[in-house]
Amino acid sequence: MSIDTTPRQSWWTRIAHPGQFTAWTTPWLKPLAVVTVLLFALGLWFAFFNSPEDYQLGDTVRIMYVHVPTAWLSQFIYAAMAVSAVGTLVWRHPMADVSMKAAAPLGATFTALALFTGSLWGRPTWGTFWEWDGRMTSTLVLLLIYLGIIALWRAFEDQLRAARVVAIFTLVGAVNIPIIKFSVDWWATLHQPASVFRPDGPRMPGSILTPLFVMLFAFTFLFFTLHLMGMHTEIKRRRLINLERRAAERGGAA
Amino acid sequence: MIDLGPHAAFIIWAYAGVTLAVGALIALRIGQSRRIERRLSALEAQGVRRRSEKSA
């Protein structure tokens, strides 16, 4: 009888090693992409062919099926980046840096889309594309924070040093997330207060909640897929930088 | 296609904008990955390895 002397690696160690992380998560990519496509197909079918118009908003309620998920992702992605920032600063976890960097462009895009779809909904509903109220202004600030984070990543050649600076910036900027969330309660705004996640239950019928939730999951799975792809690419980019440096050293020594 | 009512243009613009942005994100992610893979393969074909890796 032989004894297996191979050290058993914990889940934490497995995701800390870039090569092992890629090997472990690559099989997830295709199933995630398939689930995303199926959820979008179902969500769009509900949004356009199997949901009623709202008694007040009319057909513009269909804009909500892309506005609410993009607005949710704009905050969810930032929260994920803040958790990764803690991972970078406290544990110096290599995948936390990679996760932060891969998430920032996605967060910026979904925040821009939340503002874009919100203004297209606002024009027929409120009579204006834009109003400097609490919710809209704090979401615009979030977009500027995302753009600042992307610029910071590009400003440093040393990505490990960049990660620490970005992590601190991300954690400072996290103060904006509760401001976005509670802006509709703290200040008089054009934007309506929370109407889905409320202590007394959602304020909308099931026929509108169903497409909203399906699209919410579709966009969230889209984020998971693109984030994982982005992390794999960032790992490869870091390997490429190492190899290019090595090739330059060999060239210089020859 | 169902009748989207008097504000159809706003609804179509919203979905078109989201489709365009999401399509661009997907294309960008795939393009970046392929570009880096190509450069990595070229370097590895030249026998460039990291110090921690044994040469083949």
Image: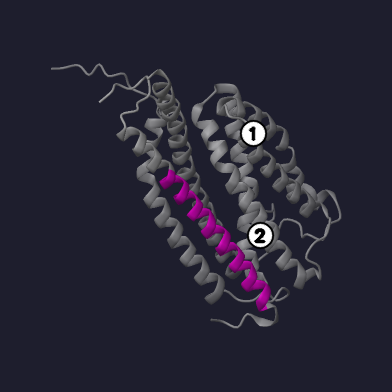
One can see residue A225 in this view: no
Judged by depth in the image, the label closer to the viewer, 1 or 2, is 1
Mark 2 and mark 1 in contact (Cβ < 8 Å)? no
Q: Is residue B16 above or below residue A182?
A: below
Q: Going by the image, does A151 lie left or right of A183? A: left
| Image mark 1: chain | A
One can see residue B46 in this view: yes
Q: Quadrant of residue A188?
A: bottom right
B9 part of magenta stretch: yes
- Provide the major secondary structure of the magenta segment: helix
Q: Residue furthest right?
A: A188
Instruction: Name the residue at 64% across, 72% down.
Output: B11
Q: Position of residue A97 (x, y in %)?
A: 55, 31
Q: What residue would you read off at disc 2?
A: A202
B32 part of magenta stretch: yes
Q: Position of residue A23 (x, y in %)?
A: 35, 36
Instruction: Name the residue at 59% across, 29% down.
Output: A163
The disc at residue A155 is 1
Q: Which residues are magenta?
A: B8-35
Q: Residue furthest left?
A: A1
Do the residues at discs 1 and 2 belong to one chain? yes
Q: Going by the image, does A160 lie left or right of A233? A: right
Sequence-wise, the earlier of marks 1 and 2 is: 1
The crowd level at tag 1 (other Cα within 10 Å; few <14, some 14-19, many 20+) is few
Closer-to-camera residue (A10/A206): A10
Callout 2, which amino acid?
Pro
Q: Position of residue B3 (x, y in %)?
A: 60, 83
Q: Quadrant of residue A64?
A: bottom right
Query: Disc 2 on helix, strand or loop?
Result: loop
Q: Quadrant of the C terminus of chain B?
A: top left
| Image mark 2: chain | A
Callout 1, which amino acid?
Ala
